[in-house]
Image (tube, rainbow, N blue to C red):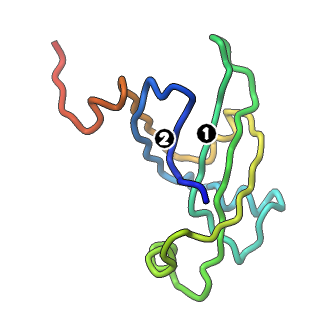
Amino acid sequence: MKIFKASVKYNHLKGSAAADRADMTDAEKWLKDNGHINDDHVVVGISMWAGENRGTHRDPVSVTFLVTGLNGYTSIPEMLQSSGEPIKVKEICLDMNIADFLALFKRLDITLSYGGLIEGKSYKLS
């Protein structure tokens, strides 16, 4: 059993992320268009990992898509609330260029702070 949470070797910086799906091609459409899933599957989670950069990024990044079926439910939230834990999903692990990964989102915002200590806190500019 796995836990869906970001973690790296030392976790010096922690934070959160939020994204809007792209209008033309979101992750689910991209996976369908590239033959990774069929119309019965929905994407319920995405994880992206980049590592061992040592000051210079080199593509690809590792992306894991968690997909499952709606199993008769009408929406993803309804299905997830009814399914309990652990959630049964299929992992699709792919290497992607960072530009292709970012194109899956209309907007993407990532926050990181030392140990996550200022996550959710207000701040003012000095």
Residue pointed to by mark 2: 108
Counting from the top left corner in percent of width and height, residue 18 is at 43, 46
- The answer to whether 13 is drawn above or below residue 82 in the figure is above
- The answer to whether 72 is drawn above or below residue 86 in the figure is below
What whole-number distance in Å separates the C-alpha atoms at marks 2 and 1?
Answer: 8 Å
Q: Amino acid at mark 1?
A: Leu
Q: Amino acid at mark 2?
A: Leu
- Of the numbered discs 2 and 1, the one sitting upstream in the chain is 1
Q: Splitting the image into 4 quarters, where does residue 17 fall?
A: top left
Confirm or deny contact between disc 2 and disc 1 (CB under 8 A).
yes
In the image, what residue occupies the spot 65% across and 30% down? 50
Q: Within 10 angstroms of label 2, few (less than 14), some, or many (20 or more) residues? A: some
Residue pointed to by mark 1: 102
Along the viewing direction, whichever of 119 and 108 lies nearer the viewer:
119
Counting from the top left corner in percent of width and height, residue 90 is at 70, 64
In screen coordinates, is 102 left or right of 6?
right
Q: Splitting the image into 4 quarters, where does residue 122 fall?
A: top left
Residue 43's disc number: none
Counting from the top left corner in percent of width and height, residue 99 is at 67, 34
In the image, what residue occupies the spot 25% across and 39% down? 120
In screen coordinates, is 79 left or right of 39?
left
Along the viewing direction, whichever of 2 and 77 lies nearer the viewer:
2
The quarter of the picture where the N terminus appears is: bottom right
In the image, what residue occupies the spot 21% across and 34% down? 121
Q: Splitting the image into 4 quarters, where does residue 37 fall?
A: bottom right
